[in-house]
Image (cartoon, coloured by chain):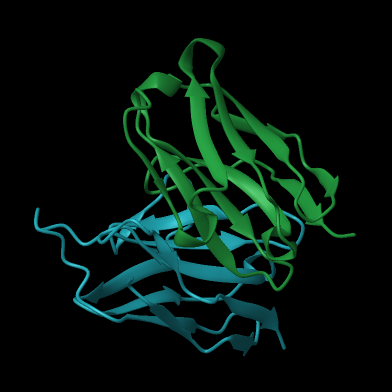
Chain colours: A cyan, B green
Amino acid sequence: DVVMTQSPLSLPVTLGQPASISCRSSQSLVHSDGTTYVNWFHQRPGQSPRRLIYKVSKRESGVPDRFSGSGSGTDFTLKISRVEAEDVGLYYCMQGTHWPPLTFGQGTKLEIK
Amino acid sequence: EVQLVESGGGLVQPGGSLRLSCVASGFTLRTYWMGWVRQTPGKRLEWVANIKQDGSEKYYVDSVKGRFTISRDNARNSLYLQMNRLRAEDTGVYYCARGTAHDYWGQGTLVTVSS
């Protein structure tokens, strides 16, 4: 099974400052079709997860452009250019290249300093 | 608007059974893989099962194989998860999710396995 390792697990950020979350996989996530299936999700307190990014860097419709995804192979990053209050909560990466099983990172908790 | 609405959760004793349901609206269910994901009390997300559009392929995480069964009724716009021989470690919020890339999630239904 592919293990997804996120860091940091806790991320205190000042409003208006940038934030970055890393996700590393235990093996390359390049599919035989050439696509890399890495998603990022955000879960606000009391809500269900919402997909932000798919296929490493494609932003979901309605997601602010301050969110961006990047990476390749085994290293992936979610960046927020300027953190806003509504960005608090849990962030998860997920791989869909080598499944079953689909696997998630442990989650990163973003909070405002 | 895509909506997924789960139901069927509750408190059950170890060894017991529950059947979760998910009703889909706002899209054509028969054209999508569908799946179940659970969130543990510690907030870890764990994929549980996926089912192909016509139900011909089903996949499960190892920890639920032989105990859980995923199914669907496209005519009723519904997805199901039959959970048997439940264990304490099955406790969590169960979400249905659209596709293998989970682009939409329901609001979740809480399953608590405890004596």
Query: Which residue lies most toward the right here?
Result: B115
Residue A27 to residue A37: above or below: below
Locate residue B82, reporting x and y percent: 62, 36
Residue B28 to residue B114: above or below: above
Q: Which residue appears at 68% of the width and 59% of the height? A: B90
Residue B65 to residue B77: above or below: below
Locate residue B115, reporting x and y percent: 90, 59
Q: Which residue appears at 42% of the width and 44% of the height? A: A61
Closer to the camera, B44 or B61? B61
Hey, which quadrant is residue A74 in on the image? bottom left
Query: Which residue lies most toward the top here?
Result: B75
Left or right of B107, for residue A54 = left
Left or right of B68, for residue B115 = right
Q: Which residue appears at 52% of the width and 89% of the height? A: A8
Q: Which residue appears at 45% of the width and 60% of the height? A: B62
Locate residue B93, reporting x and y percent: 71, 53
